[in-house]
Every structure is written in structure tokens, then in C-alpha cells.
Image (cartoon, rainbow, N blue to C red):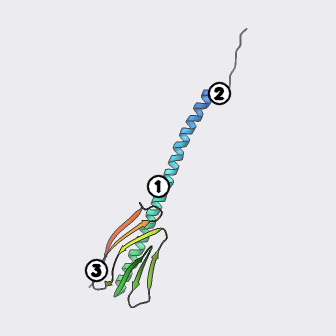
């Protein structure tokens, strides 16, 4: 008696090997996906800090050119720009940003050096630093 089987299915070993390979490829693709999301979040935060710094520097430059005197002060997470002889106050307040600005009372006849550091409150390792000098033509 001759028994012959015509097997057209998968063996258990073949099925397990296929599952292992799909799992490995799935984990690799999944990790790349989450790394790209994290990278995107970090770059978005850096971009936000840079835009806020540009806004602050441009605002101070406008005030420096047009005012005789102004004061920069900080209160916890807010930064205030107060223009002397005017009721105008500019407030920089973003809940996602911690401000660190060095400044004091400024006279229009002198240059003003500004050291500005902005730190993300969501991830303290993300920060943007800039240094600039404001001056007027004499």
C-alpha cells in the first residue's frame, strides 16, 4: 500500500517563521514612526521659540528706535516692555515658553545689549538663545 499526501498547506514552522518576520518588520517600522513624531515635536518647539524670539527682538527694536526711555522687566513667566512717558505696555506671555531676558532701563542715547533665552516648558532641554545690540543713529 502506497500512501501519498498532497500537502498544500503551511507547516507550523513556516507559519511561526512568517509571524516572526512580520513582527520584526512591524517593530522596526513602528519605531521609525514614533522617532519621526518625536523629532517633529522637537523641531516644532524650536521653531516656536525662534519665532517668539524674533517677535520680541523686533518689538524691542521698534520701541528702542521710537522711544526716549523704556524698561524691560520679568514676572515669573511673563515679560513686560514698559515705555516711559506713555501708557503703552507690551506683554510677552506664552504658557509654553519660559522667558529669560536681561534688561534694565534704557536711554535713547546709548546702545542696549540684550541677552535673550527662551526655554520650552514642555521639554526643558529645548531652548533658543540669541544676543543682540540695539542702537540708534546719532
Vertical placement of residue 19 versus 122, above or below: above
Label located before the other in sequence (3 or 2): 2
At mark 1, the secondary structure is helix
Q: Which residue is mark 1?
A: 39
Q: Residue 80, position in %: x, y?
A: 42, 79
Residue count near mark 1 (Cα–Cα under 10 Å), binned few <14, some 14–19, many ≥20: few
Q: Please tell me which residue is depicted at 44% across the width and 84% down the height of the picture.
A: 89
Residue 112 placement, left or right of 28: left
- Residue 111 badge: 3
Q: Please tell me which residue is depicted at 39% across the width and 86% down the height of the picture.
A: 83
Q: Farthest residue to the top: give it.
A: 1
Contact flag, marks 2 and 1 (Cβ < 8 Å)? no
Label located before the other in sequence (2 or 1): 2
Residue 94 placement, left or right of 10: left
Q: Please tell me which residue is depicted at 51% across the width and 47% down the height of the picture.
A: 31
Residue 107 placement, left or right of 34: left
Amino acid at each position: 500500500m502506497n500512501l501519498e499526501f498532497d500537502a498544500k498547506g503551511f507547516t507550523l514552522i513556516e507559519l511561526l517563521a512568517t509571524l516572526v518576520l512580520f513582527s520584526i518588520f512591524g517593530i522596526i517600522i513602528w519605531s521609525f514612526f514614533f522617532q519621526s513624531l518625536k523629532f517633529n515635536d522637537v523641531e516644532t518647539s524650536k521653531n516656536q521659540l525662534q519665532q517668539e524670539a524674533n517677535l520680541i527682538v523686533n518689538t524691542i527694536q521698534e520701541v528702542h528706535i521710537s522711544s526716549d526711555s523704556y524698561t524691560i522687566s520679568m514676572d515669573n513667566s511673563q515679560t513686560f516692555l514698559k515705555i516711559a512717558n506713555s501708557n503703552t505696555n507690551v506683554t510677552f506671555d506664552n504658557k509654553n515658553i519660559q522667558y529669560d531676558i536681561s534688561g534694565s532701563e534704557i536711554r535713547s542715547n546709548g546702545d542696549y545689549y540684550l541677552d535673550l533665552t527662551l526655554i520650552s516648558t514642555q521639554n526643558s532641554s529645548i531652548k533658543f538663545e540669541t544676543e543682540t545690540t540695539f542702537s540708534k543713529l546719532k
